[in-house]
Amino acid sequence: MSWVVLLSLVVWLYLVLAHGRFWASTPELSPAVPEQPPDVDIIVPARDEAQTIGPVIASLAAQTYAGQFRIILVDDNSTDGTAAHAGTASNLRILTGQPKPPGWSGKLWALNQGIAASSAPVLLFTDADIVHDPRHLSALVAGLQRPEGRARVDMVSEMVRLNCTSLAEKALVPAFVYFFQMLYPFARVNDPHSRVAAAAGGTVLIRREALDRIGGIAAIRNALIDDVTLAQAVKSSGRSSAAAVYLGHSGLATSIRPYPGWSDLWQMVSRTAFTQLRYSALLLLLTLAGLTLVWLVPPWAILFGHGWVRIAGLATFLLAGLSYLPTLARYRCNPLWALALPFIASFYMAATIGSALNHWFGKGARWKNRAY
């Protein structure tokens, strides 16, 4: 068992020292004004979002962007009067979504209809629970116009600030962001020479020509993890022309969707966790083994090890905890939450197993009363 503890320490040394500084919880777009503001069409897919859509549309209408922009709300067959709660704005257009055809995810079908109704050279896809600072659109476009090295940026995406007020949210939401950073180190995503690509679907600004280059949204029509799939398609298709994608954190956009209970966050994770593993039992087993090595071996060594094994376990546990502090600081959470990482990781491991069981028993993923 001692070699397993040593391996865990080596893995953590790699993660902290050589894995794209994932733990730094950076970068973040600052407020900025683009030099030449292009026209932008903002597409908001919404299904049963009556509780959040009003403030979302109001925040978009209040953007101080110097160029022309339109808001296209695609009401995806809502049953709660979402469109009626959207409010009014001179640049707001509301589309009634058509029934979803086979082979499409609901969100991508709604986006596709919004794209068909748009004409601007730049598109912003944003969720119906995201409230935007008035400077947000300007900052996004400025980021699109700022090159990454020598590469032109084709897509800008941000991990918006998630709701983090309940006990369950404080325990699990910063960890969700932290694990996402670990899976897709933002520095590598933003490196045009790296094959790592990812995005956060709450805010995606994309050039129309880049979307056309991959064959439009239809090219990823059945993707449930649509943000990452889109980023991968855009980055890989633009590699020959030195195109880049950008992923960062947002200080100018916030999700107002609450996850008040543990079960709410369980459902959020289990909805797509097994999809991330491509529905592979082998990848599930390897993932669980890797997570055990990274998160459960160090506390085991502290509790049951002796001599250098206990010291190695303690050093590994400290590395893991220290790497979590920047993300906790971003969410203004008590740094003592870092001590709970093994328990938090166990929750995510259990939710991943639950996701696999749902798939194997034919339950599949569900969102807004739709099954996939």
Image (tube, rainbow, N blue to C red):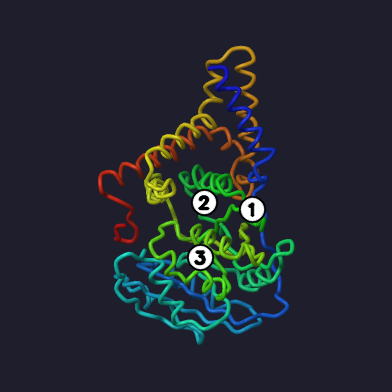
Q: Is 8 drawn above or below residue 185 in the view shown?
A: above
Q: Position of residue 205 (x, y in %)?
A: 57, 69
Residue 139, which numbered label? none
Q: Amino acid at mark 1?
A: Ser
Q: Which residue is mark 1?
A: 194
Q: Amino acid at mark 2?
A: Cys
Task: Please tell me how crowded label 2 is: few (under 14), some (14-19), or many (20+) other residues with Cα within 10 Å.
Answer: many
| Front residue of this view, candidates 75 and 246 | 246
Please tell me which residue is depicted at 38% across the width and 51% down the height of the picture. Answer: 271
Q: Which residue is mark 3?
A: 130
Please tell me which residue is depicted at 37% across the width and 77% down the height of the picture. Answer: 83
Which of the two labelled residues, at mark 3 and mark 2, occupies the earlier sequence position? Answer: 3
| Front residue of this view, candidates 219 and 45 | 219
Quarter location, residue 251: bottom right
Which of the two labelled residues, at mark 3 and mark 1, occupies the earlier sequence position? Answer: 3
Mark 3, mark 1: which one is toward the viewer?
1
- From where the camera sits, is residue 261 visible? no
Alpha carbons under labels 3 and 1: distance apart: 30 Å
